[in-house]
Image (cartoon, rainbow, N blue to C red):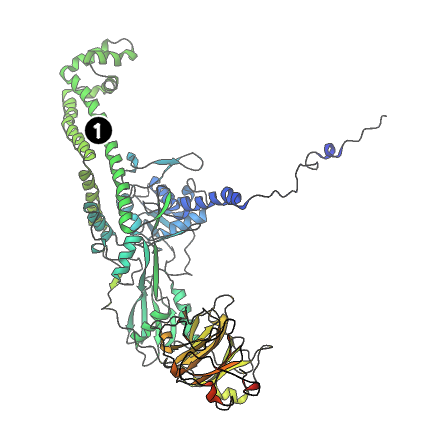
Amino acid sequence: MAKKKKEPETQRHGTLTGHIENAGLVVPQPITDTLRQNYMPYAMSVIVSRAIPEIDGFKPAHRKILYTMYKMGLLTGGKIKSANVVGQTMRLNPHGDAAIYETMVRLSRGYGALLVPYVESKGNFGRAYSRDMAYAASRYTEVKLEKICSQLFADIDKDTVDFTDNYDNTMEEPVLLPVTFPSILVNANTGIAVGMASNICSFNLLEVCETAIAWIKNPNCRLIDTLKAPDFSGGAFILYDEDELEKIYRTGRGSVRVRSKYAYDKQNNCIDVTEIPPTTTVEAIMDKIVDLVKQGKIREISDIRDETDLSGLKLTMDLKRGVDPDKLMQKLFRTTPLEDTFSCNFNVLIGGSPKVMGVGELLEEWTAFRRECVRRGITFDLHKKEEKLHLLKGLQKILLDIDKAVAIVRETEEEREVVPNLMIGFGIDQVQAEFVAEIRLRHLNREYILKRTQEIEQLLKDIQEMEEILRTPKKLDAVIISQLKEIIRTYGEPRRSQLLYQEDAPEEPEEEELPDYPVKLFFTAEGYFKKITPQSWRMSSEHKLKEGDRIVQELDSQNSVNLLFFTDKGQVYKSRASEFADTKASVLGDYIPSKLGMDPGESAIYMAVTSDYKGFMFFVFENGKAAKIDLSSYETKTKRKKLLGAYSVKSPLVYLESCVEDKEYLFATSASRMLIVSTAMLAAKSTRDTQGVQVMTMKTGVRVIKVSSYEEGMVDNPHRLRTKNLPATGAIVRSTNGGEQMTL
C-alpha cells in the first residue's frame, strides 16, 4: 500500500487556519477620516431622523405612531389596546415596542405632558409631574386619536404632502403631516441630538392661532400683543418679563421663570402645592426640601407628604405654629425647584437642516409650508372636478339622442367596437365614451341624464373659484385663516398658566437672620479653614494640620460674618462663616479650593473677614506699587460666589491685608532699602483691579521682597525710614539696623 502524501497545513484545516495577509496588523487611519466615515453619519442620523422636530411639530417617532393610528381608523370609533397600536407601528418604526409605547405615552392625555394631547387614553399612563409613577404595560391600556387629530391629517389623501417608503419598502408614510395649525408652537418638544439640542415651550392653542392670523395679515405685527406668554399643561404661574419674552420671540433663545401655585389651609395649618413647573417633579421637590430641613436651613416645616390622587397633584407641607406661610414659600421659591426656569431653544429642522428660529421665523416657515399644502390640496380637487366635468360633458352630448346611443351599442357586433363607435357617433373622446358605455340600462333615461348634467354648471363655478384661489395669494391665505378661525372656535381653551406681573408678585422678605454666636476662625497656608466654637476650643486647642502646613490667620469673630478668600489668580470667592460646619481643632477642616469650587490649580492665599464691608484691602506688588481698595467694592447685591479681577495681576503680589483703619507698614527691597509707609497717604479706590500708585522708587532689577505691619521697636531710628512724600527710595539698612527683626 502506497504511503499517503501529507497534505499542507492550510489544505488540511482550510483557509480559516491558513495564512491571512495582514492579519493582526494595525493600520493607522487619520482621526479626521474616522470621524468623517463613522461618526458623522451617526450624528446626522440622530439630528435629522430622531431628536429634532420638523415644521409640522413632530419628530419621526411621533409621526409614525399618529399616522399608524390614523390608518387603523382610530380617529373615529372606540379605543383599542395600546399593544395593538404598538405592534402596527413597528411596520414603520423598527426600534422596539418599549420605545414606541413610551413615545405614545408622552402623547397621551393621561400622561399630561402636552398642552393639547393627541392620544385619548384609558388606564394608567403615569404622570408627567411624577418621577416614580410608572405607566401600566401596553396590554392593559387603551387608546384612540383625539378629535383635534383630524386637523393633523386634513386632506392628507389629496397629495398635500410627500410620502416616502418605510424601512423595508412595503408601505408608504408621510414625510410631514399637513397640520392646519402651528403645532410646532402648541406643544412642548424636547430633544438632545449630537452637538445640539432643541427645547420648545408650549403656547396656548387659541393664542397661537390668533397670532398666526395676525402674522399672515401683517408680518410686521407685534407678536406679544396676541401671544402673551408660554402656557404649560401643568399650569403654575409665569413670572412675566416682557423684555425676555420679546427676546425669545425674536431669537428663539431665552428663559421663562415658572412658579408653583399653592394654597394655605388655615384650619390644618398646612400648605398645599397643586401646580408645579414643567421642568421638575414632585419627588425632586420633596427631596430638596427634606435636604434643606436636614441641613437646618428650613425649620418651619414639621412634615411633608405627597397626597396626589385621582383629582390631581397635591403636595402638602405641615407647618409649625406661628409660621408665616407666604414668607416660607418665598424662601422655598429661592431654594427649591418650586420655582424653576424653562430654557428655550427653538431648534427646528427646516429642509433637513437644523436652524434656531424665533416665533416670527417659525410662523413664516409654517405659513409657507401650509400654503404649499393648501395649494396642493386645491390642485388635487381641481383635477378631480375637471375630470368629472369632462365626463359629464360627454354624457351631455348623448342627451339629445339617447336612442342613437342605444342603437350604436345594439348594432355593434363586437364589444371592443362599442367605444370607438360611440366616439364616432357623438364626437367624444375615449374616456367619455368609456364612461357612457358603462352606464347601466336603468339609467338610460332622460331624468337621470338631466340630473347628472345639471352638475356641470356647479362644477364650472367650483373650478373657476379654485383657479382664482391658486392665482391669488390673498385668497389662498384667506383659506388658511378660515381654517385657523374654525380651530379657535372648535378647540380653543383658556390659558392654564397664569401670568404673574412684577407689581402682583409679593416682595421677597428679608432673609432670615442666621444663628449668630462667637466663633474662632483659622486659615492655614495650604488653604484649609476651620470654624471652632469657644467651648470646643477650650476643650482642645491642639491643631491637626497637614505635614508642612501652618496657621497663618487666627481671629475671634461671629458665625454671621462674610468671608472673602483671595486667590493667587487674582480672584476672590465669597462665602459666609455660617455656611461652614462647626468643627474641632483635631480635624483638618474644609479645603477652601474644593469647598468653593475654585478653578484647577488655583489656591487661596488670604482670608478677609467682614460683617459690614467697611474698611479697605491693602495690596503691595513687587514693582513697588501699592493699592488701597474699598472693601465695599467686593459687596454685591446678588449672591455672587465668585468675583473676577479681585486685584491687579500686572505685577506679582507680595502682601495683602484687610484693614478697618489706616496703619503703617514696613517695606523692604532686594537692594537692602526699607521704607515705612502709612496707608493714610494713599487714596482709596473703588476699582478692584487698579494697578495702584508707586510707593517706592527702585532701580532696574530691584523689587519689593517683604512687607509687614509696622510696630514700634521693629527697627532702630524709624524716623529715617519715614517720608512725607510718595514715591520714596527709602533708606539703606545696615546689618545692625533691623537685622533679624525684618522677618515676616
Say if 650 sits above or below 735 in the image: above
Residue 678 visible in image: yes
Regarding mark 1 in the picture, which secondary structure is present there? Answer: helix
Say if 103 sits above or below 154 in the image: below
Say if 197 sits above or below 177 in the image: below
Pinpoint residue 665: horizontal percent, then vertical percent: 46, 83
Q: Residue at x 14, y 27 (%)?
A: 457
Say if 254 sits above or below 467 in the image: below
Residue 531 visible in image: no
Quarter of the rendering occupied by the N terminus: top right
Q: Nearer the viewer, residue 28 or 732?
A: 732
Pinpoint residue 634: horizontal percent, then vertical percent: 38, 74
Question: Image check: 217 left or right of 96?
Answer: left
Q: Residue at x 20, y 14 (%)?
A: 427
Q: Nearer the viewer, residue 742 or 432?
A: 742
Question: Image check: 450 left or right of 138?
Answer: left
Q: Where is residue 545, by image quadrant?
A: bottom right
Residue designated by label 1 = 385
Q: Residue furthest right?
A: 1
Q: Where is residue 135, by image quadrant?
A: bottom left
Q: Where is residue 29, by image quadrant?
A: top right
Q: Residue at x 25, y 38 (%)?
A: 374
Total marks in image = 1
Q: Amino acid at mark 1?
A: Lys
Q: How many residues crowd mark 1 within 10 Å: few (<14), some (14–19), many (20+)?
A: some
Pinpoint residue 15: horizontal percent, then vertical percent: 68, 34
Pinpoint residue 219: horizontal percent, then vertical percent: 21, 47
Q: Nearer the viewer, residue 540 or 670?
A: 670
